[in-house]
Amino acid sequence: MTPPDAPAHDLEPTATDRQASRARPSPQANRSALPRQTPRRRRPAGKIQAGRGNLDAAEGDHDGTDTALGDYGLFGPGSATWHLMGEPILWVAGIRALYLQALDPRTMLGTWQNSALVHRHEAWARFLRTTEFVRTRTYGSTPDVERAGRRIRKIHASLTATDADGTVFRLDEPEQLLWVHCAEVDSYVAICRRCGMGATPGQLDAFVDEQRRSAALLGLDPAKVPASVAELDAYYAEARQRAQASGEAKKSLLMSFNPPVPPALFPLKLVAPAVNALAFATLPRWARKLYGAPGSPVTDILTTAALKGLYHATRAAPARLRYTPTVRHARQIIREYERYQDAAP
């Protein structure tokens, strides 16, 4: 378990980081890139270096203090994370993750007994805080990311819940944190793979590997976190044996179809049932069966077709409407860095 003031585990730069560092850009050109990703080997825990922004310092400058490289936080323009995240279709992944996370009994009990998400008058504000954490974790500077990590670790370490047999447990137990992490990452991978965005197996492996940095923010040891899609699948092959759809999980599922939103955002309430139904249908068959729904292969085929249709529909919208300002800025950084790489000898 992680004490309230425990630091995040450190993580060594990945292979993609080193690939990007071979073409060291000028301060201005450095602000963007996505080199082609290749499948990752699992790497041991190492150091998250401030100011690296997913680019290693040049040889002889491994402490990452060269401010000319900029500070892109945990990931940066050379990462699969920046390339894959930001598409509106991944809102479906976020909802899917909540449904999958709820299938761990202790995780669901801890949420039900502590989280504002289950209290209708507080749920919207809690939802906004969660989305802001994801934004900061993905695109924020190193100080912002570390600040957000300290806050969430402190919150988790201060909370407890009571099991059905009266056992009191903490919300920062590694087993629960790992389930939550894997549910989120697996959901992003599943939607990216099925929606037709063209994510390659190498990019998806790189994404899973990079997200060990996110796990470190929660207090997990990244060396014990899945580092590839195959390792993620292996985790679920074992961990799903303890999964169950408790009464709280089923109530939470039903509540999500009638979300509390401010009056100005009432249209969201109208589209929520359709989007949530799609998110539920993207769950693996074993998870749908636990909720009492059919686990039919036909559902999988129809769901994949629906995801592709939704993805291409969102792509038809202008970028200024499709992406948030943060995502638009990140995509501009990527384009600039790609131009620099193309021009490099």
Image: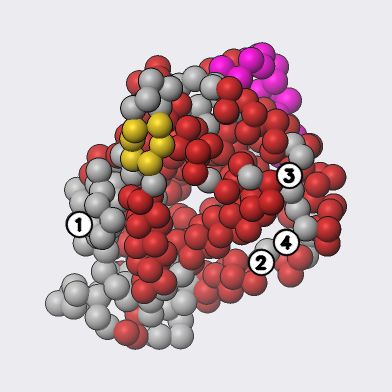
Nearer-N-terminus badge (1/4): 1
Q: Tag 2: residue type?
A: Thr
- Identify which residue is drawn at 24% across, 52% down: 3
**In the image, residue 309 lies in the stretch drawn in magenta:** yes
Q: Does the magenta stretch include residue 99?
A: no
Distance between the alpha carbons at the discs numbered 4 and 2: 7 Å
**Cα gap from disc 3 to disc 1, whole angstroms:** 41 Å
Q: Identify the main secondary structure in magenta.
A: helix
Give the magenta range.
Answer: 290-310
Left or right of 181 in this view: 335: right
Q: Which mark is residue 329?
A: none
Are discs 4 and 2 less than 8 Å apart at CB?
no
Against 213, residue 66 (above or below) is below
Q: What residue type is labelled 4?
A: Arg
At mark 1, the secondary structure is loop
The residue drawn where x is 79% and y is 37% is: 274
Q: Name the residue under label 2.
A: 324
Residue nearer the viewer, 305 or 106: 106
Q: Nearer the viewer, mark 4 or mark 2?
A: 2
Location of residue 144 (image quadrant):
bottom left
**Cα distance between the residues tagged 2 and 1:** 32 Å
Asked whether residue 202 appears in the rendered view, the answer is: no
Local packing at callout 3 (Cα closer than 10 Å; few below 14, some 14-19, many 20+) is some
Q: Which label's residue is closer to the chain start, 3 or 1?
A: 1
Name the mark on residue 322: 4
Q: Is mark 2 on a helix, strand or loop?
A: loop
Element under label 3?
Answer: loop
